Amino acid sequence: MSKRGIVIVISGPSGSGKGTVVKELRGICPTMQVSVSATTRLPREGETNGVEYYFKTREEFEGLIERGEVLEYTQYNGNYYGTLKSEAERIISAGDDLILEIEVDGGGQIKRLMGNECVSVMLIAPSAAEQESRLRGRGTESEEVIQGRLARAKAEIKEAVNYDYIVVNESGKQTECAENILAIIKAEHFRTERMNSYIAEYFE
Ligand code: 5GP
């Protein structure tokens, strides 16, 4: 029976450890796909076009929006970020699960668009203090930059109530955290609305 993959939105403010957990998740479940987003931000050292992101100019990105080629998009730190419809459709129509590692604005857009077809997970640090210490421990940024990040993180966490699941990423336990997310995804596959075709077949 042909089936479509599930879209899993994973959001988490800086300090939640989202990047590491998503890497772990892909390690323990290699069939899980991550869609490559488009962005207008410049590539960081070691980033390759088509791998981490499709790097676009503002004009190119606005063209994608005008032609309706993005599933969702937002502006974050002055740059556009968006999920390409073509990427997402290719993955879910092949029956693979798709992870969208996106911020809360985009997460909300996907939820409104897809409803229960999508599962949303908000990843958080175990406490506000731990989150702040992870943010501070990260580098040599100025207090102003850190305060800006903390404020943005708090605004993102406020959106957690609109997510289907909230998962805590305990320090040093990223594998367990990824396993918890995998458990959610596995259970979602057995939701009644996803299993209906198996029941319908009995009555054809
Ligand atoms: P970064 O510049 O650090 O790679 O990403 C900044 C933020 O943008 C992160 O929270 C990341 O999850 C989010 N992001 C990456 N791709 C997309 C996207 O396609 N759509 C949205 N809405 N956010 C994205």
Image: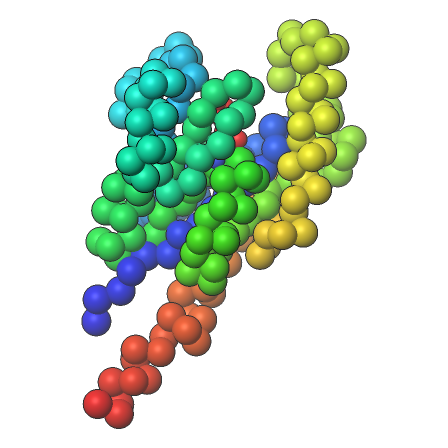
x and y percent of residue 23 in the render? Answer: 43, 35
Q: Is residue 178 above or below residue 64?
A: below
x and y percent of residue 73 in the render? Answer: 44, 35
Q: Report the residue at 42% width, 40% height from top.
A: 72
| Quadrant assignment, res 69 | top left
**Labels in figure, total:** 0
Residue 99 shows in the view: yes
Camera-side residue: 113 or 190? 113
Camera-side residue: 131 or 106? 106
Q: Is residue 55 above or below residue 31?
A: above
Q: Quadrant of the N terminus?
A: bottom left
Residue at the front extreme of this rendering: 66
Camera-side residue: 85 or 7? 85
Residue 27 shows in the view: no
| Quadrant assignment, res 174 | top right
Q: Quadrant of the C terminus?
A: bottom left
x and y percent of residue 179 in the render? Answer: 50, 50
Residue at the right extreme of this rendering: 129
Q: Report the residue at 67% width, 31% height from top.
A: 153
Q: Report the residue at 43% width, 56% height from top.
A: 114
Camera-side residue: 96 or 83? 83
x and y percent of residue 36 in the render? Answer: 33, 33
Q: Report the residue at 43% width, 17% height from top.
A: 41
Asked which colour scheme the image uses, the reply is rainbow
The reply, left or right, for residue 146 in relation to residue 102 is right
| Quadrant assignment, res 158 | top right
The reply, left or right, for residue 102 in relation to residue 14 is left
